[in-house]
Amino acid sequence: MKMNFFVVAKLLSVTTGLLYSGYVAFILSILAILLKGWDSLIFWIFIVITMLLLVLHHYLAFRVKFDAQLIEMIAHESKTESIENLTQQFDQTLLSMQLMPESKAGRDWSLRFAGCFKLLKIQMTLLLIQYFVLIIVIYKLLAQ
């Protein structure tokens, strides 16, 4: 079970590369719009959409990275304490800081890992949407 914590933490740490790729999509989209079509209303809409996607992507990257660091911390601490005791302390800390609703306290770690993977999948989906918007912007520019 302890190895699961290390593996999940390392897998979730790929979020940095995804975020950088999102920055590339954002910059290329903005440059494409500003170089040719910034005077059109539709391109202003694309700028707003691109910025919103970047903000959402950045937030998700922060959440996934935070989860990865917490899971890695628990993995290291599990060398000296039991996972059950660490889970109780972890839940109590998150509840006292209002970072977790009471209904989620005491969940099994497999459910927690599934939630982390869900956030990572959402982040990857947002990255694909960012590149899809970039393709649409380039297509619109070439169609003009």
Image (tube, rainbow, N blue to C red):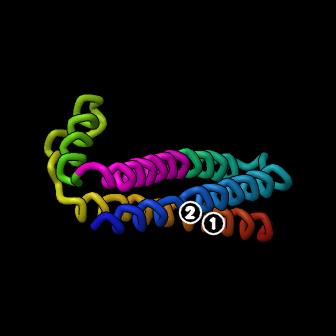
Q: What residue type is labelled 1?
A: Tyr
Is 60 in front, or is 78? 78
SS for callout 1: helix
**Mark 1: few/some/many CA within 10 Å (<14, 14-19, 20+):** some
Q: Quadrant of residue 111?
A: bottom left
Q: Mark 1 points at which residue?
A: 131
Q: Is residue 64 magenta?
A: yes
Task: Return the residue found at the far front.
Answer: 80
Q: Identify which residue is drawn at 22% across, 42% down.
A: 91
Count of number-bearing discs? 2
Q: Main secondary structure of the magenta part?
A: helix
Disc 2 vs disc 1: Cβ atoms closer than 8 Å? yes
Q: Where is residue 55 in the image (x, y as percent from the top left)?
A: 55, 45
For the record, the magenta segment spans 56-81
Q: Please state if 75 lies on the left or on the right of 126 as rendered.
A: left
Q: Is residue 135 left or right of residue 9?
A: right
Asked if 44 appears above or below 121 in the picture, the reply is above
Classify the position of the C terminus by image quarter. Answer: bottom right
Please name which of the two marks, 2 or 1, marks the residue nearer to the observer.
Answer: 2
User: Is residue 118 something one can see in this rendering?
Assistant: no
Identify which residue, 62 or 78, lies in the foreground: 78
- Residue 38 sits above or below residue 119 on the image: above
Residue nearest the viewer, comparing 42 with 93: 93
The structure residue drawn at horizontal position 77% and vertical position 54%, both measured from the top left corner, is 33
Element type where label 2 sits in the image: helix
Residue marked by disc 2: 127
